[in-house]
Image (cartoon, helix red, strand yellow):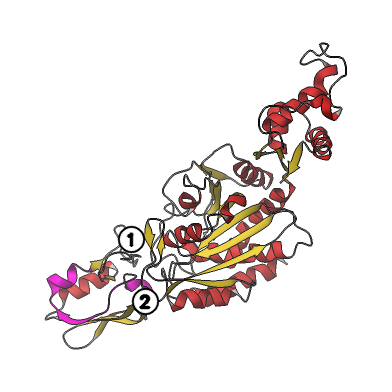
Amino acid sequence: MKKKSIESFDKFLRKLFPLCRSLSGEMNRKTLKILQEIIPLKIKEIESKTKVFDWEIPLEWNIKEAWIKDSKGNKIIDFNDNNLHLVSYSIPIKKIISWPELKRHLHLHKEISDAIPYRTTYYKKDWGFCVTHKQFELLESLQGDYQINIGSELKNGSLSYGELILKGKSKKEILISCYICHPSMANDSLSGVLLAAFLANYIKSFSNQYWTYRFIFVPETIGAVAYCYLNKNKLKDILMGLVITTVGGPGSFSYKQSWEKDHVINKVIEEVLKEEKKDFVIHPFDIHGSDERQFSSPGFRINMSSLFKDKYYEYDAYHSSLDNLELVNGEQINETFELYKKIINKLEELVFFKSQNMFCEPMLSKYDLYPKIGGSLIPNNKSSDYISNILWLMFYCDGTKDLLSISREIKVEFKELLIIAKVLKSKGLLEQL
C-alpha cells in the first residue's frame, strides 16, 4: 500500500508540475480535471468582476508564449523552457525596447544566483520576466535592442475552483483547504494539492465516518475570500480545519498553530507527531502565511492549522525554480500523508456536546439528577462528585470544546465523563454535534 501511494504521488507530480497555474485560466481547469482522476471533485466557476466582500474576481488570464530575443532574433529567455520565467498575470506585449527599459522589468533571486524567482502582478497591469543572474548578465552584455513578446490574454471569464463534500453522520464539518494557483513549484504547493486529494480519497474509503468533510481547491487569497463569500452561511457548521501546503520537502516537520493556540486541532496534531516520534517545530499563529487568515477572520473565526514538511518561507528553494521535482518526491509527500491520515483518525474520535440550557444551569431535580433532600452536598466529597461532574460538563459544553479536552480540564476520566454525557443527552440536556 505504501509503495502504491508513493508511485501515485510521483505519477501525479509529473503530470501536474509542468502546468502554468495562476489565479485563473485554462491550466487551473486542467489541474482540477486531472484531480478528478483521484476524487469526484466538482469544478465550479465564479465570473470575472464578481464582488466578493472587499475584493473583485480578476479577469481570466491565459498564456501561450513569452520570450525575449536579441537584436539578431536569437531567443534568450523562453517561457516554454520554464514557466517561472514570466511574471504571472503579465499583460500582452509585443515591442522592441532598449536595455534600460527591459532592465526595469527583469527580476532576479536575491540569494540564489542560479534560481529563477517566482513573481506575480495580479492586481496591477504590468509585465515582467524572471531570470537567473547568468541570464541577466548575458542580456546586459548584448548589443542593440531587444524583441519582447508576451502572448497572454486577459478577458472576461471566470475563476475556477474545486469542491468535494464527504457527508458523515454529523452535519458539523471539518474544512480542508489547499491552493492551486502556484505554477511549477513542487513543494509550494503542488505537494499540498496532491496530499489533499489523496486525503479526501482516504476519507472517502471510510464506511461510516462521523464528521462531514469539506475539501476545497482554490487559488490562494482571492479564491478563499470568494469561497467564504459564496458559502458564508454554510461555514457556520465548520468546527475546525486544516490548510494543507508545503508537505513534500526533504527537511523537517513543523506545524502552525491555529489562532486559538489551545484549540483541540493543535493538540491533535501535536499528539500525532509525538506518537510517531517525529522531531518538529511549533510555529505560533501568524497573520502571514496562507488562507487560514481568511477562514479565521473575525466573521468566521474557524481554527485552521497546518502540518508542514519544509514550511513556506523556511526552505532555500521557496518561490523559485529550485522548488522542483529534484527537491520533492512521492516518498516525502507520503511520509506527511501518513501523519495527516492519523490526524483524521484522531479527529474522528473527538466528541462534542452542546448544552440545551445555554442560559444558566438546568434544574437537575426535574430530571432526577439531584438528591431529593438538599443541603448535604459538599464539593469535592465523593457523594457530590457525580453532581459536580454534571455541573462542570454542562458549564463547558458550549459546542466549542471537545469532551476529551473537558475531561483533562476537570481531571475526570474520559470514559466516566462520556457515560454522564450520554445520560444528559438521553434526558434532552445535551445535544451531540
User: Could you say where residue 334 lies in the image, as x and y percent from the top left?
Assistant: 62, 62
User: Could you say where residue 124 lies in the image, as x and y percent from the top left?
Assistant: 27, 65
The three-letter amino acid code for the residue at tag 1 is Ile
Q: Nearer the viewer, residue 194 or 369?
A: 369
Farthest residue, direction bottom: 73
Q: Which residue is labeled 1 in the image?
A: 112
Picture quadrant where residue 414 is located: top right
User: Could you say where residue 161 lies in the image, as x and y percent from the top left?
Assistant: 51, 69
Q: Residue at (23%, 68%) from the top-left corner?
A: 106
The Cα atoms of the two marked residues, 1 and 2, are separated by 38 Å
Q: Is residue 115 above or below residue 82?
A: above
278 relative to 160 in the view: left or right: right
The three-letter amino acid code for the residue at tag 2 is Asn
Task: Decide if residue 119 is in sight here.
Answer: yes
Secondary structure under tag 1 reads: loop
In the rendered picture of this protein, how many numbered marks are placed on residues?
2
Q: Nearer the viewer, residue 1 or 345?
A: 345
Q: Is residue 356 above or below residue 221?
A: above
Q: Residue at (47%, 47%) from the top-left corner?
A: 297
246 relative to 351 in the view: left or right: left
Secondary structure under tag 2 reads: loop
Q: Which of 396 and 119 is in front in this view?
A: 396
The residues colored magenta run: 82-105
Say whether residue 89 is magenta.
Answer: yes
Say whether residue 32 is magenta.
Answer: no
Farthest residue, direction front: 366
433 relative to 311 in the view: left or right: right
281 relative to 382 in the view: left or right: left
Among numbered discs 1 and 2, the one appearing first in the sequence: 1
The numbered disc on residue 156 is: 2
